[in-house]
Amino acid sequence: MSARVDVEKLWKYCKKSDYSFFILSLGCLINSVNSVGNLKKRIINNEVVEYDYLEGVTPIMDECDNDYKEMKVKIPQEFKDIYEWHDYAKKLSKDILNNKKDCFTLAMEKRDFTNIANFSCIPWVDFDSVTSCVLNGRQIQPLITWGGVNKNYEMSISITVNHIFVHGYDLGLFYRNAQKEFNQAYP
């Protein structure tokens, strides 16, 4: 499913305050995923497991736009506030790209067995929908992609889920909570 959210407050705040819109958007989306219990469910050893939280995994790239690596970030709630989390994620990204820290390397077929959700940003495209790669029919982990911000400060967010746990109501909650996250009042 893909839907647009209004990101004007966060966009303008980031431009005014020199925060990374990518990183703070990632934080908003991690919080949104974690706000819906069914997005945190998996099947492990033929048993349904609901993780307490899902950390985020996202590709990052160097300034030359030619070297992608993956980064796994903690949830924003582990930090004093979203700004401290922003600084942590920004430093982690820089350290991974500069080979000071290892990137995330878990194979796709093993990702359903850990507490992660996969995120990807395509800031160059204001898309209407995205078709995500699904490894197999048993894949349950959420795949979230967000695009560029258009002139109306709207941004498309696509989420791919497995219908075994996630239903229309859950998707509605995800998008409603995403809009709340992006609407937060920033000082």
Image (cartoon, rainbow, N blue to C red):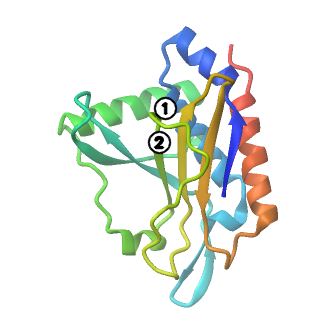
Would you name the residue on which mark 2 appears? 121
Residue at 27 percent across and 49 percent down: it is 103
Residue at 76 percent across and 62 percent down: it is 170
Q: Going from the N terminus, do you reach mark 1 or mark 2 first?
A: 1
Determine which of the numbered discs, if any, sits on residue 64 in the image: none
Number of marks: 2
Helix, strand or loop at label 2? It is strand
- Residue 18 in the image, given as x and y percentages of width and height: 48, 13
* Residue 127 quadrant: top right
116 and 9: which is toward the camera: 9
**Residue 65 higher or lower than 14, as above or below:** below
Would you name the residue on which mark 1 appears? 22
Residue at 22 percent across and 38 percent down: it is 66
* Residue 97 quadrant: top left
185 and 176: which is toward the camera: 176
The crowding category of the residue bearing disc 2, from other C-alpha atoms within 10 Å (few below 14, some 14 to 19, many at least 20), is: some
Judge left or right: residue 79 versus residue 57.
right
Task: Determine whether label 1 and label 2 are within 8 Å by CB.
Answer: yes
For the view shown, which residue lies furthest in the right direction?
169
For the view shown, which residue lies furthest in the left direction?
99
**Residue 128 higher or lower than 109, as above or below:** above
Residue type at tag 1: Phe
Residue 79 appears in the figure: no
- Residue 48 in the image, given as x and y percentages of width and height: 63, 82
